[in-house]
Image: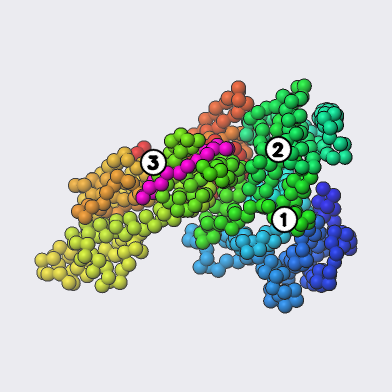
Amino acid sequence: MDLFSFVTSCKEISSSLQKLHSLTPVTSRIQKALEFSIGAHKEQYRKSGEPYAVHPICVACIVAYYGGDEAMICSALLHDVVEDTHFSLDEVRCEFGDEVAQIVDALTKIVELREENIPKGIQDAKILAQASSFRKVLLASIKDVRAIFVKICDRLHNMLTLDALSEQKQRKISEETLVVYAPIAYRLGISSIKNALEDRSFYYLLREEHNKIQAFLGENHLILKGKLEEFVQKMKNLLVLEGFQEESFQIQSRLKRPYSIYLKMQRKGVGVEEILDLLAIRIIVQNSIDCYRVLGLVHLHFKPITSRFKDYIAIPKENGYQTIHTTVFDKRSIFEVQIRTFDMQKSAEFGLAAHWKYKMGNQISLDWLSNIEYKDQDIGEFYELVKSDLYREDIAVFSPRGDVYSLPAGSVVLDFAYAVHTELGESAIGAYVNHQKANLLERLKNGDIVRIVTGETSGMRCSWIDLVKTSKAKNRIRISCQNKLREINLLIVMQILKTFFGKTYAQIQSALSKNWINPNAILSEAEIKDASKKLVEYFYKSGSLLSRLRYLNWELQEYEIDNLKILSHKPIDGILYDYCCYPKQGDEVMGILENQKVLIHHKLCEKAKIQENTKMVFVDWTGKIGAKYKIVIILEDTRGALARFLTDLAKYGCNLTGIFYKGYQDQFLTHFEVDVEVDSKIAKELKNGISSKYKIVEFQNLKDAYR
């Protein structure tokens, strides 16, 4: 796009101002914002050397090109003023009004977090500040979607001018762009920005792979161009022959984008030279009926690959995208053919911005934004949920009434139930998929019709949190399980103290109350020791002479058996497992005392019934050994690929305990299986980190207590 090329190379305030004047009428308020921005950033320069004011003006150019209104253009010009200069938000509000100030406030990064807002155990406050800034702009966009649009334009200009930064910063910014901002551009339906963000991120993150694809396309340019031109001419002749006037349609041709090619290589496990459908054309016609006429002609004259046919006109994507996709053979070549109307073309390129630029009306669903279920989560958890929700491929699933629900590929029935309504998810006990009985964890496919069966009690299990795909389902399961754990923890604490002291529930409750001890706050080894010590003193002072003798030498004994620490007032000579819940290293566990053995269960085990007379002791993991994980990954069959992967594992402090090679020549796949030991607290960070660079087939915790 000419505009993107311009803002990439623009280094002078004068040329950026000239471009802005060519894109939008410069009102008195925009002129005032221009002067304010240039003055505020007067002594500041970008890493690449040009005056800093070039950046906000170029962002304003992008906003203006996409039809942004006066407030949006002013906000783009002022978006860094509060963060990077001495001017305050109140001064911006005073000069430009509440509307502009609210958008600027949403775009102003949170540089530092207050200490009380940093979760325990988190070392990198910068990452949390980054996540907090993102949450700020996302939540502000629920009220005014213009804020996230200006932020996307800001990120686009940063990506187009990223060369001046260090390689480390290039990679960090590109990774965030690929997994957060490009998906947001997709959700807003703005394919032109999404494509630019993806390809630039791909270049900085995987430059070797990017250059390899570009080299292949360059070497074969003439051959590929010739095939495209020949196929386009065939299509033109066919349409004219069938009664279409030449001026009534357009045919565009293109090679697939580098990042799109790379994703296909990863999905299929093949090299770029083995990708068959690099060629694509787009046929643009006057109306929807003509789209289906063209589709009929294409399928009648060229052999279609039926599995690749998708009708997004009849069933639009959640972001409003409407186009028919089909793939056909012509001689020995394969072509992707897209068919859409001229209005659909505008909508696909500009998405939400078509509402501002062409006054087309907003046909894009913003449910993903307005239905945010995770706004009250802690910062780190919020950021992970948003990323998983945004960075996904979608499928369309139907209710029995024909309502369409967009879900991530790989979603299960329970995801659908929560997507329909929270209460439906909470009460789901089963389902019918395409009129066949199914369980709540059955994986859904594009076009499935799903009916949920409900009951008085939920069929959901806490262990399902990693099996569902949507943030809504994950969050509701997490909340339900946290509430359940709080109830169980209180019950376990009371049973442990009853066992330790041989008292009734009422006696323990009274003793805790008189010593100002909250049983809900007793979770750790130190807290159980402290509470026990205070209760010993209390029962000693308030008891009879005989009972005082009992508490005179009373103390808790510590035992370490199979990576478990046990606190008991009586001798323990071993642990047992009931093979019903399989707790893994780091899971929440409880210990039931039977004679001198401790029976270990997961706290959420369905079979472990805690009765009035159940005797319990405190158990927890020693933390001496990291959890063991099996990682199965697909690596490109190139020199140094395995070495790079192992280097990335080492960055997370992984202890490599095994590595196995599995080649599948007939599938062109190279599987590597590695066994590693790593602190279970950073396992999620490890998985997210490597999944952004490699294709993960399996990531499984192997360190369960039964081994």
Determine the secondary structure under disc 3. Answer: loop
Q: Whole-Å distance between the Cαs marked 1 and 2? A: 21 Å
In the rendered structure, the answer to whether residue 26 lies left or right of residue 362 reads right
The front one of 80 and 145 is 145
Does 152 sit above or below residue 629? below
Number of the label disc, if any, that sits on residue 324: 2
Sequence order check: which comes first, mark 2 or mark 3? 2
Magenta region, residue range: 444-459
Number of the label disc, if any, that sits on residue 361: 1
The front one of 650 and 415 is 415
The amino acid type found where label 3 is placed reads Asp
x 31%, y 48%: residue? 560
Sequence order check: which comes first, mark 1 or mark 2? 2
How far across and how far down the image is residue 255, in percent?
Answer: 78, 35
* Crowding near the residue tagged with mark 1, few <14, some 14–19, many ≥20 C-alpha atoms within 10 Å: few
Determine if residue 239 is in view.
Answer: yes
Number of the label disc, if any, that sits on residue 473: none
The amino acid type found where label 1 is placed reads Gly
x 53%, y 57%: residue? 374
Give the residue pinned by disc 3. 704
Q: Give the mark toward the camera: 2 or 3.
A: 2
* Crowding near the residue tagged with mark 3, few <14, some 14–19, many ≥20 C-alpha atoms within 10 Å: some
How far across and how far down the image is residue 375, in percent?
Answer: 54, 60
